[in-house]
Amino acid sequence: MKLFIPGPVTVRQDVLNEMAKQMIGHRTKDASKLQKDITEKMQKIFGTKNQVLLSTSSGSGLMEGAIRSCTLKRAACFAIGDFGEKWYKMAINNNTPADLFKSELGDITTPEQVDEVLKTGKYDLITVTGNETTTGIANPIKEIGEIVKKYDDVIFCVDYVSSAGGVKIDADDFGVDIAITSSQKSLGLPPGLAFCTFSPKAEDRAKKVENRGSYFDLLNLKSFIDKKDNQYPTTPALSLMYAANFQLDYILNEQTLEKRIQNHKDMANLVRTWAKKHFDLFATEEKYASNTVTCIKNTKNIDVANLIKELKKQDILLGNGYGDLKDKTFRIAHMADFNIDDMQDLLNRIDNILGF
Amino acid sequence: MKLFIPGPVTVRQDVLNEMAKQMIGHRTKDASKLQKDITEKMQKIFGTKNQVLLSTSSGSGLMEGAIRSCTLKRAACFAIGDFGEKWYKMAINNNTPADLFKSELGDITTPEQVDEVLKTGKYDLITVTGNETTTGIANPIKEIGEIVKKYDDVIFCVDYVSSAGGVKIDADDFGVDIAITSSQKSLGLPPGLAFCTFSPKAEDRAKKVENRGSYFDLLNLKSFIDKKDNQYPTTPALSLMYAANFQLDYILNEQTLEKRIQNHKDMANLVRTWAKKHFDLFATEEKYASNTVTCIKNTKNIDVANLIKELKKQDILLGNGYGDLKDKTFRIAHMADFNIDDMQDLLNRIDNILGF
């Protein structure tokens, strides 16, 4: 089964094979080296010199940890779809004071909108979706970052769960304090690992926050790494780390990150061109359409469930619309280790099924 | 490297190979089936008819989730070593009201002690360590359970992280509401998955508790499973689930749980006999010595670090004492898929190094 859903993605067999390696002790020098290697490589993916933290969990775990560990006053959660709203709900579930600022579905979070909210002086942390999987939109993080930089006391958290490894991220340059991703999307790994950057500013903030919990207490993760030579408070998913270390080597050295990013652009362009020909993009402005997943407006009112069913017969898994967008849209992920030929093949199959 | 540390354990190659299988969609019928299969098999390991919850995390995550999700009034945390104390710290880190009741290292938590504490009427949840990895002690959970049953409103949580799969557990019969374990110990799996039972009584309690968080909110996990045909709110570690499903089949059908438990008893007896001949058991009473890990009192004041170093040259990893017990003890794990020959071979090697 080839997975064209926005994660879990189809993983290269070489990467899967890495997981068949035997366990090592998690309190050994080998474990320290493995963890250090992965964090150094993830620094390149995120474009940061700050510490990268690993978590055995989905990306949601680190999103919860970020907002809970680093909000002292109040968090402003900007949402352009379900995953943005989820971040707000995580805050509420933890008694972390937060407000939600929703954009119309299909729109972005604008730098102006962020400025208006931060001007009130009520907020000392913001969460923004870097890549919204439900609507196929990539927010202008660099431009939003320019605004956030005006506010010294604001921690800037970005959800890059479905795009890190497939798009250019310069977290330090953008002023992102906590950039979060997980393994099973554009990085081309199996699910179960999450990663985030952690700026000294975020670390200082967390020191002032009480009630940070345990497993997702980012300050505790950071302190443990510092004290224990890159080890972690609890036993991490070693097999997934073997795979991550191997795949990151492939991405950074064999493939190169530049080519990987270009491949995502090329695949996105192909799918968007096709989508515009037969349907329409869900994104209000094409320049904000995601390079890892395209959300297609079902302008022809096709039977999406049937399309998915027919593709399944051909051993292909496609994503329907998410939540309220279930029948109004469908989604094609073009992420991780697929290439332009894989995407063209998929589009040809859809053309055949729909009689285009 | 053969791992005689109390987790991660050496994993059977067949099990590791399962992880080299390709991803599936986590919102598919195949995913539902996989999750249902694992939970049904884990019910047999735990001896419960209640729902079993899966978590992509270490066991610590579910320990935190249990105490936070189900304490309404106040939790009593009984500790016979570091892992018992950790549970208390997790409560404090979450602003969950809790008190700590420590036994002397080497001793158990007695049913009388639990009765004294519960008699006060201050507590509506207790945490007890089923198997304390740092001291090699198994608490009398059945006997403690008899006491807890007298108190209708008390939720009984037990940490079986390092023993489930290697010892007989009858959670329902013992009156355990939340029994917790993780993959990388006696179950013989790689780290990254955790499992817990969740009784209707615990579920009712959680419904009354506010501020349960998100990722480890046990009620949310249970509700999602109920509503979404055994699926989970976030993407689980599929590769580890393939391995778990395969290994649980092996344990329950090929090996049989009875034989696995007997094998743990046999290995434990061999190691304890050796330990008593040359040193002494750390456990005050041998009948409470764990069947999955033996903590040996360093009565001969041997150089433990050197023993570990010499064994490492022979590609064997042994555990030193934990925390304050570092030089006073050393630990031999006899869990998961080792057998009596593996243990005899290890003891022979130690004899040679120490000149016994």
Image (tube, coloured by chain):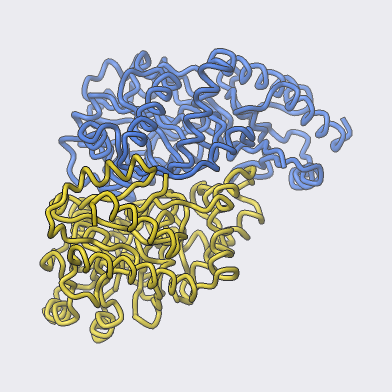
Chain colours: A yellow, B blue
**In the depicted view, which residue is nearer to us: A196 or A259?**
A259
**In the depicted view, which residue is nearer to us: B257 or A316?**
A316
Horizontal placement of A110 versus B290: left or right? left
Q: In which quarter of the image is residue B331?
A: top right
Q: Where is residue A84 in the image (x, y as percent from the top left)?
A: 21, 61
Does residue A79 show up? no
Please determine whether, in this image, residue A222 is positioned above or below residue B283.
below
Residue at image location 42% in from the left, 44% down from the top: A1
Please determine whether, in this image, residue A325 is positioned above or below residue B311.
below
Residue at image location 74% in from the left, 47% down from the top: B305
Q: Position of residue A266 (x, y in %)?
A: 39, 72
Horizontal placement of A92 versus B179: left or right? left
Residue at image location 30% in from the left, 42% down from the top: B27
Q: In which quarter of the image is residue B296?
A: top right
Q: Where is residue A109 in the image (x, y as percent from the top left)?
A: 18, 73
Q: Position of residue B208 (x, y in %)?
A: 15, 36
Horizontal placement of A28 versus A333: left or right? right
Residue at image location 61% in from the left, 50% down from the top: A27
**In the depicted view, which residue is nearer to us: B15 or A284?**
A284
State the residue lying farthest toward the front. Answer: A355
Does residue B19 show up? yes
**In the depicted view, which residue is nearer to us: B14 or A92?**
B14
In which quadrant will I find the C terminus of chain A? bottom left
